[in-house]
Amino acid sequence: MMNSFLKKIAIVLPTMVIANVVCLKAQTNITGQKKLNTITTGVPFLRISPDARAGAMGDVGIATESDANDTHWNIAKMVNNKKKTGAALTYTPWLRDLVPDINLAYLSGYTKFGENDNQAVSASLRYFNLGTIAFKSIDATDLGTGYPRELAFNLGYSRKLSENLSLGVAGRYTNSNLSAGPATLPGTVFKPGNAFSTDIGVFYTKPMKKDNEDGDRLNFGAAITNLGTKISYNNVRKDFLPTNLGIGAAYKYKIDEYNSMNFALDMNKLLVPSPQFYKNVNGEDSTQYYPTNVSVINGLFSSFGDAPGGVAEEFKEIMWSTGVEYAYQNQFFARAGYFYEDYTKGNRKFATLGLGFKYNVFNLNMAYLVPSGSGINRNPLSNTLRFTLLFDFDAAKKKNAADDDKDEE
């Protein structure tokens, strides 16, 4: 019995460490009490917002103006970057209020080619360092130290189908080594989890006034991300990847020659099965369970109608993000945003703030998440500053060419 208990703990503990999610036990129907039914998946680090610009705008990015971080938000946007080549590097501390050695690093880049630069290839690397973990047995015996790590690498391709419409696709390899440590259990083989997935995106952009590319503009985007195999750390259970459907819209309003505003709204929904409830002898919901034996394709389609609470609960599974950005001469930026998730589906609600500065060949963006929640509901990024550096190599080449012309004169 003790080995069985240890096995269950070892299976769920890594996911709890990363996602900061408490496994829900039996829920009873108490009048006036909301029933918690949070969707959980494997490798939730794939859904962490990796860049400071989007992070400062409430985690919106599906239809905002393009940059080198589009490999996460919408691969179809990549070919719409104004410059030919670019790269970005982001550093994000994680759970900084509690531990000092957990962080997420994200490196991405792209280059455009073809007739009128109507195609683009891109790549990104996401590395999640979970620091060190002290393993102990159920009787508190020291089992040693582990060093869990996770990474994801992807390659993408996007293409313009017309002046306004573009499509993109990306392939991703994910490695999650959460069981990197001395803990072992009889009958259970722990191993790093590996998974392959793909992203598919579409992006539509149109200036509101004819022949005014730098004026008011309306964007729409949609993307399905992390659609792929399940992931497993042992010979007992396989978990779904955080397959997600995102739909977004953004509007750029140019106030005058020097000032402009960007408004954006995203909605996201996980395309994985909702947790279900066993019925007790009275026909009431009893113990919660996760339908991990459902296939990926069946889980994708059934996710639109499998919530125990029906249509009302399906709508509660939608996460909302909204953000605004003010730009002065396209060099100085001030940003704010808000993220909302229903109480029964995770209860993440937080406001974000941020600043940006663009000079010559690089941009520097900063994001701050306003402290929210308490205890297990406290956001891992509360009181945390994260930074993104974006490099514009195309601009660098043009600057060097201009310097050469001056030297010749």
Image (cartoon, grey):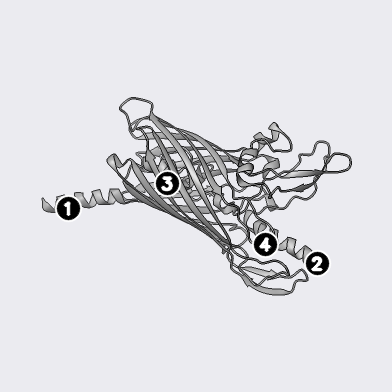
Residue under circle 2?
2
User: Considering only order in the chain, which callout, 2 or 1, is on the residue closer to the N terminus?
Assistant: 2
Question: Disc 3 and disc 2: Cα gap in Å?
Answer: 54 Å
- Tell me if mark 2 has few (under 14), some (14-19) or many (20+) residues whose alpha carbon lies within 10 angstroms of its own: few
User: Answer yes or no: do the residues labelled 4 and 3 have beta carbons within 8 Å?
Assistant: no
Q: Residue at x 57, y 53 (%)?
A: 45
Residue 261 shows in the view: yes
Tell me where residue 320 sits by quadrant.
Answer: top right
- Distance from disc 1 to disc 2, alpha carbons, whole Å, reads 74 Å
Callout 4 amino acid: Asn
Q: Which residue is mark 1?
A: 404
Q: Earlier in the sequence, mark 4 or mark 2?
A: 2
Q: Element under label 3?
A: strand
Nearest to viewer (mark 4 / mark 2): 4
Residue type marked 1: Asp
Q: Is residue 335 left or right of residue 232?
A: left
Indicate the quadrant containing the N terminus: top left, top right, bottom left or bottom right.
Answer: bottom right
What's the residue type where badge 3 is placed? Gly
Label whose residue precedes the other's in the sequence (1 or 3): 3
Q: Which mark is residue 356?
A: 3
Q: Residue at x 74, y 60 (%)?
A: 8
Q: Which residue is mark 4?
A: 235
CA gap, disc 4 to disc 2? 19 Å
How far apart are labels 4 and 3 at the CA level?
47 Å
Q: CA distance from mark 1 to mark 3?
A: 30 Å
Does any portion of residue 390 appear in the rendered image? no
